[in-house]
Image (spheres, helix red, strand yellow):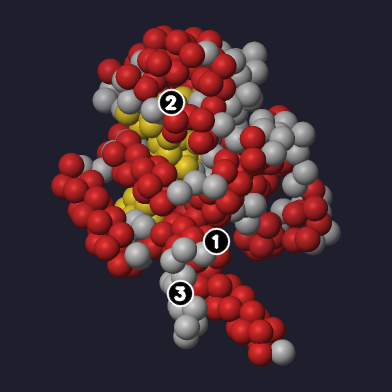
Amino acid sequence: MADNCQSIGWQITVITGMMYGFAIRPAGQPIPGTIRGAMLMIDTLITRLPKCELHIHIEGSLEPELMFALARRNGISLPYASVEAVRQAYQFSNLQDFLDIYYQGMSVLITEQDFYDLAWSYLERARADNLVHVEMFFDPQGHTARGVEFSTVINGLHRAIVDARQALGVRASLIMCFLRHLDEADAEKTLDAALAFKDRIVGVGLDSSEAGHPPSKFKRVFNRARNAGFFLSAHAGEEGPPSYIWEALDVLGVARIDHGIRAMEDQVLVGRLAREKTALTVCPLSNLRLRVVDDMAKHPLRRMLDKGLMVTVNSDDPAYFGGYVNQNYRAVSDALGLDRDEIVAIVRNGIQASLMTPSEKNEAFAEINRVLATIP
Ligand code: HPA
Ligand code: ZN
């Protein structure tokens, strides 16, 4: 009986610790040296370390509750009876299945305030996950094609970013993605529109349906974006083959690869990515939910670290894939048994690969050291 009580008490302690992100030691039960203690230490580490997110589609953070609220506000009818029905519909066999629902979801975003509310909600979550810096993708063509002005999108997102810096202490910037299932001329028009807001957009990326749309399709527009001073990244090697990663690097000249997990099929490419320290923005829960991997225990992230790749962990479309950044860290570290050094290495990679200034990076590295000193 006493044993039972102690065990239940211990479980409550673990759960409380996991919810609030700190380690509580029940009297007489040392944490170090036990499996539960180690798990709790990893969880505390994930929660408390200052982190960056480099791969989040802001439209993919639209939670069903906000989707319904915005639909009501804008007089739009949704093809779902309830929030629960929306969540039920999130069963995907591949990237395209998801994208069909993702584009439908964003139809509730109409006014500047809608974009503000979307970004603000995400940035509050970012604060809760102890993110210090976020590079946020957005898909202007998903909005301008529906008659929403580019300026409406950018003004709403930007205002949320300014407010979040002030009120939440989270730094965020915007990376505009071209939809690769559309043609390059459409991307060119989008770049033209973005030039008027150059001070509010740090970079350009490439997303949407990967198969059949190689990076080389966007060679000219990426060249223009580079000349205009934008940072460049591209989704490659999520569903597409390693050759798409080669093209993103050599034809588009990107500095970062989004996803990139299929690089592991090409050891020459792996060698190059490791040598050049090219960051890969890996999104474990996305990979699982889109069936790029069929079991988290088989996720290549651990093997990628072992090959010396600069892996970062991110959420991609958290409202659709079941978790924000910390949940991605937890899912992959539970499934692969990542240790303290591996978690810290991934967090450091995210900081190093970000567009923060050198002094902002140094401050984040110093904060990591302070946190590590408090976790035995
Ligand atoms: N892959 C490609 N395009 C996307 C994604 C993704 O995971 N999310 C939103 N657009
Ligand atoms: Zn993505």
Q: Which label was assigned to residue 232?
A: none
Mark 3: which secondary structure?
A: loop
Give, as a three-letter code, the residue at label 1. Answer: Ile
Residue at the outermost bottom position: 2
Residue occupying the point 21% across, 55% down: 366
Judging by the rendered image, the residue that carries numbered circle 2 is: 307
Judging by the rendered image, the residue that carries numbered circle 3 is: 30
Label 2 or label 3, whichever comes before in sequence order:
3
Residue 239 image point, x, y percent: 63, 24
> Taking 89 as reference, is 246 above or below it?
above
Image quarter (top left, top right, bottom left or bottom right) of the N terminus: bottom right
Residue at the outermost left position: 359
Residue 12 image point, x, y percent: 60, 79
Judging by the rendered image, the residue that carries numbered circle 1 is: 35
> Taking 5 as reference, is 123 above or below it?
above
Give, as a three-letter code, the residue at label 3. Answer: Pro
Is the CB atom of the residue marked by disc 2 within 8 angstroms of ligand 2's nearest atom?
no
Crowding at dot 3, Cα within 10 Å, few <14 / some 14-19 / many 20+, comes out as: few
Viewer-proximal residue among 303 and 51: 303
